[in-house]
Image (cartoon, rainbow, N blue to C red):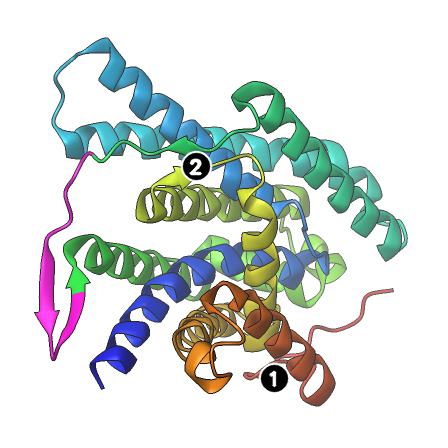
Amino acid sequence: MDIFLQQLINGIVLGAIYALVALGYTMVYGILGLINFAHGEVVMIGAMVALTVIQLLLGAGVGLPAPLVVAFGLAAAIAVCMALGFTIERVAYRPLRNAPRLAALITAIGISILLQNAAMIIWGRHYHAFPPLVTPTPHSVAGAIITDQQIFIVVLACAIMAGLLYLVHRTRLGRAMRATSQNPDVAGLMGVNINTVISITFVIGSALAAVAGMMIGAYYGIAHYFMGFMLGLKAFTAAVLGGIGNIGGAMLGGLLLGVIESLGAGYIGPLTGGFLGSHYQDVFAFLVLILVLVFRPSGLLGERVAERS
């Protein structure tokens, strides 16, 4: 029972990170019908920028408290990722808005490869270790261990997701986003600036990616130029699982995928007699993707995005 609870805790923490990244996918898809496969690389850029700023502050010997150093690193990552998201939308996606879907998809993959190689040139091919600024304090819960770092990640992720739901459903900007998602042409006739709404959507999604990048870098203690590829695929799987285009579905899908992956990694060894180890946990994410696409393509919450001409 304690093993199950431990894997459940680990899965919820991982799922909270997946959910933040999946929100970036689902927001863009909900408005543009575009799967932004470069989103995982924005997560990676956020982690690398945060790490760089933290290392610079520690190397300068300014003597700032650890939480303040982390806050500066996170703020820099958010600023850079927001600028990057705005630039990607303005330069790469906006000219192709009325082009065939395949053109935008190929462009997204190209942007992903471009960002990977740019990060490799800037930060190198090797792994970078996050400085252990804060020593996690473990707490025992029914035989399982949860740290204050894990609690903070889950609470912060939940707070961000609640804030995003409020933004989308209770603010003027959110109404403009929903109107653009339903029918951009009619929304434009009603006075909504479509270009501005789409740019803000990319900026918000990129800010969430920066937070997720900082979280996963600090949680696992490493960052590297290729970390966004697999994370992006899993977050896309989470978005599809919950119902891509549905914000609540992205959050649900992220949490479920994290729990499924963690439980699978914990029990795959005993179930296969030691033939498969925990490093096969990625199998579960893509197995989930296949099953969802086969049996319920619209996702668990079942929102369908209208096909645009």
Magenta stretch: give its range: 133-145
- The residue pinned by badge 2 equals 47
* SS at mark 1 in the image: loop
Q: Measured from the top left, where is residue 27 in percent x and y?
A: 57, 58
Residue type marked 1:
Gly
Residue 31 or residue 285, whichever sits in front? 285
Instruction: Identify the element where label 2 is drawn.
Output: helix
Quadrant placement of the N terminus: bottom left
Indicate which label's residue lies in the foreground, 2 or 1: 2
The one nearer the camera, 306 or 173, is 306
Q: How crowded is mark 1: few (under 14 residues within 10 Å), some or many (20 or more)?
A: some
Label 2 environment density (alpha carbons within 10 Å; few <14, some 14–19, many ≥20): many
Outermost residue, top side: 60
Q: On residue 302, which mark appears?
A: 1
The magenta stretch spans residue 142? yes
* Residue 302 image position (x, y, % from top left): 61, 84
**Residue at x 35% of width, y 22% of height:** 53
| Most foreground residue, 164 or 230 | 230
